[in-house]
Image (cartoon, rainbow, N blue to C red):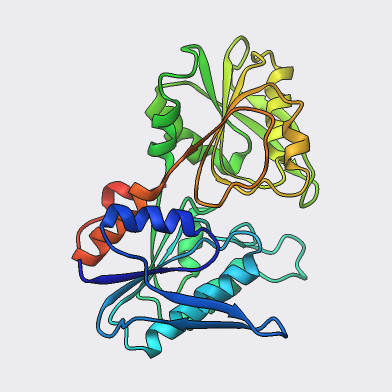
């Protein structure tokens, strides 16, 4: 395949796995910092007239990884790249998609506008926090879903009497997809966010009594949402053997401390971001390299992505 693939420093292991599946070598480049911490990027091979794919999650620290993606893109454009694609396994700032108090920015729109300045032809992102984010990008967005990969990883390993739990109203569509694949009933936790780290559960809709909870979410950041959801379903009679499934395992701040005392028998996450935390429960990391490799191949060849996309 005559295309080039580069990556920044956010998750080189995932990018290498994608390149291996595609049978190509990752593009050679250097990322360095000047003494004043300014970023410098340089490509070490030609991209003129070629399709170029930049594989980079904008994971913590998001500002640094976003700048790497922008600089790599600008370098490729100035070096004569034909078509330029961003492959973003995790999109930072996705939760800042609206103003909650009025006197604050819409961070997701700001980052989308920045990405628009470097001329991406298409952007492929995995399990955005909300599907409405597609509308803030200047370039066309292919919204990929890792749901099938993660659901298949837990299929057959959870009790027959399980229930898929959405930890808040915003995750209902995602939970419905898991419930459909796993052929399980679903319950919804009513959640109210008190701050960036604190949430409050206000009840459960749906039957969980005597059932094993499978809590699903797009991401785990500080784990406040997961903690509140598990405590809520336990209070309603769910069995103390939760499975937690999430695409993006950020696990920042008090996340590990919050998860440690919970009756979680297994945590299943993707490798969209590098997992650095040491966790007190069994963790299964499911690679999304096959999803990204298939996406890159189809984009390069102009083939449909319909069966890989999130439609709701």
Residue located 64% across and 59% down the image: 60
Left/right of residue 121 with respect to residue 187 in the rendered view: left
Q: Quadrant of residue 9?
A: bottom right
Q: Is residue 99 visible?
A: yes
Residue 257 image position (x, y, % from top left): 78, 36
For the image shown, how many numbered marks are present on the structure? 0
Q: Quadrant of the N terminus?
A: bottom left
Nearer to us in this view, 207 or 246: 246
Instruction: Name which residue lies at 36% across and 88% down.
Output: 79
Q: Residue at x 77, y 62 (%)?
A: 101
Residue farthest top in this picture: 210
Asked which quadrant contains residue 254, the reply is top right
Location of residue 248 in the rendering, given as x and y in whole percent from the top left corner? 55, 47
Residue 310 visible in this rendered orientation of the protein: no
In the picture provided, is 17 more to the left or to the right than 42?
A: left
Q: Is residue 183 left or right of residue 62?
A: left
Rendered view: 301 above or below 279? below
The answer to whether residue 196 is above or below residue 118 is above
Query: Looking at this view, is 126 or 1 the one in front?
Result: 1
Depth check: give the residue in front, 108 or 34: 34
Q: x%, y% of residue 179?
A: 45, 28
> Measured from the top left, where is residue 175 in percent x and y?
50, 34
């Amino acid at each position: 395949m005559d295309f080039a693939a580069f990556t920044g420093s956010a998750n080189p292991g995932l990018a290498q796995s994608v390149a291996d599946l595609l049978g190509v070598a990752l593009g050679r480049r250097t990322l360095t910092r000047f003494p004043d911490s300014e970023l410098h990027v340089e490509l070490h091979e030609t991209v003129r007239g070629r399709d170029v794919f930049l594989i980079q999650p904008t994971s913590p620290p998001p500002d640094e990884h976003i700048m790497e993606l922008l600089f790599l893109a600008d370098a490729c454009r100035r070096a004569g790249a034909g078509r330029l694609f961003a492959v973003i396994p995790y999109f930072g700032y996705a939760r800042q998609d609206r103003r909650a108090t009025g006197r604050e920015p819409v961070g997701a729109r700001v980052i989308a506008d920045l990405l628009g300045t470097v001329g991406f032809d298409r952007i492929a992102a995995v399990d955005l926090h909300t599907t409405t984010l597609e509308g803030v990008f200047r370039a066309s967005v292919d919204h990929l879903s890792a749901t099938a990969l993660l659901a298949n990883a837990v299929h057959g390993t959870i009790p027959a009497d399980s229930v898929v739990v959405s930890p808040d109203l915003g995750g209902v569509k995602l939970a419905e997809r898991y419930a459909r694949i796993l052929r399980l009933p679903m319950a919804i936790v009513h959640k109210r966010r008190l701050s960036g780290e604190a949430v409050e559960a206000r009840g459960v809709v749906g039957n969980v009594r005597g059932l094993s909870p499978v809590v699903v979410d797009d991401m785990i950041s500080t784990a406040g949402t997961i903690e509140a959801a598990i405590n809520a379903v336990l209070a309603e009679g769910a069995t103390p053997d939760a499975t937690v499934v999430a695409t993006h395992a950020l696990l920042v701040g008090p996340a590990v401390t919050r998860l440690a005392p919970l009756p979680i028998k297994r945590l299943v996450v993707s490798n969209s971001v590098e997992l650095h935390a040491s966790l007190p429960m069994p963790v299964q990391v499911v690679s999304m390299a096959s999803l990204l490799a298939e996406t890159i191949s189809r984009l390069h060849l102009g083939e449909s992505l319909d069966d890989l996309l999130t439609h709701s």
